[in-house]
Amino acid sequence: MDIIDEITRTHRELKESGETKSLLVTRHFDAETKDVWDACTTAERISRWLTPITGDLRLGGSFQLKSNASGEILQCEPPSLLKVSWVYGGPPASEVEVRLSAEDGGTRFELRHTAEPPPDMWTRFGPGAVGVGWDLSLLGLSLHLSGGVLPDHETFHETEEGRQFITRISQAWGETFLATGADAEQVAAATAATTAFYAPSGE
C-alpha cells in the first residue's frame, strides 16, 4: 500500500454554519460506478471493507453496523445517490450522503457527513474525530475495489504502516481545520488528541 498516494487521492473540506459541521471527502476510484455502488450498498461487501452490517437495506429500511453506527435509509437512487441517518453513541442523529458519478474511466466518490457535534467533543478533537474514521473506511474501500489485502481493523493502528497512515490523515484534517480560520493552538491540540485516540501509544 502506498500510504502517501492513498492520502493525497482524497480531498477534504470542512464547512461550518453555527453548530452544524459538514465534512466532505472526495476521491477517485479506478472502478466502474456500478461496482462502487454495489460495494457501498450490499451487506456482504460492506462487511468485507467496513464492518459487518445487518438490517433492511432498502429505501425506508434501517441498518446497524457492528459496534458502530445505526440509522435509516433516507434516499436511494442507484447508482448515484445514497443518504442515511447516522446515530453513533446515541441521539441526535447526523446525516451521511454518498454521491457517485462516472469520471475518467472510473468513479468520482463524494461523502458528506453533516452533524451538530457536542461542543466539548468538537473543542477537543475538531473534524478529525469523524474525518479520520472516514479516511480509514475509504482506505478499506479502495483496497477492496482494487483487490488488495485489507488490514485487520482491530490491529491496523498497532502496525508501523497503520500508525503512519493515521498520523498523516490526522494532520491532514488538522490542516483542513486550520484552513477554516480555526485557532492554530486549538488545531494543534485537536490533531494531537485525534492521533492519540486512533493510534494510542500504549505507554
Image (cartoon, helix red, strand yellow):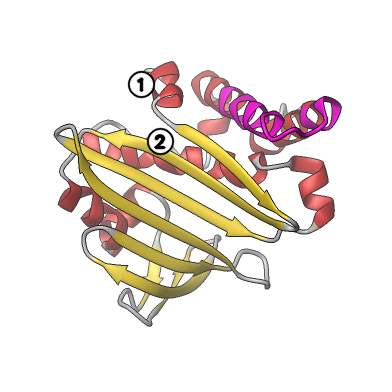
Quadrant for residue 58, please give it: bottom left
Q: Type of residue at label 1? A: Met
Q: Residue at x 44, y 22 (%)?
A: 8
Task: Work out whether 164 lies above or below 181.
Answer: above
Q: Which residues are magenta?
A: 168-187
Query: How many angstroms separate mark 1 from mark 2 (CA)?
Result: 10 Å
Residue at 41% x, 66% y is 83
Q: Which mark is residue 1?
A: 1
> What is the x, y in percent for residue 139?
40, 35
| Residue at the spot 55% in from the left edge and 60% down from the top edge | 68
Q: Nearer the viewer, residue 36 or 163?
A: 36
Helix, strand or loop at mark 2: helix
Q: Residues within 10 Å of mark 2 (few under 14, many from 20)?
A: many
Q: Main secondary structure of the magenta part?
A: helix
Using residue 72 as the reference point, say whether residue 131 is left or right of it.
right
Percent of width and height locating residue 94: 59, 65
User: Can residue 153 be spotted in the picture?
Assistant: no
Which numbered marker is on residue 83? none
Q: Vertical placement of 145 versus 89: above or below?
A: above
Counting labels gives: 2
x, y percent for residue 196: 73, 32
Residue 157 forms part of the magenta stretch: no
- Categorize mark 1 by other alpha carbons within 10 Å: few (<14), some (14-19), many (20+): few
Q: Which residue lies under the disc numbered 2? A: 139
CB under 8 Å between discs 1 and 2:
yes
Label 1: state its secondary structure.
loop
Q: Residue at x 53, y 64 (%)?
A: 95
Considering depth in this image, is 63 or 175 the residue closer to the camera?
175
Quadrant containing the C terminus is: top right
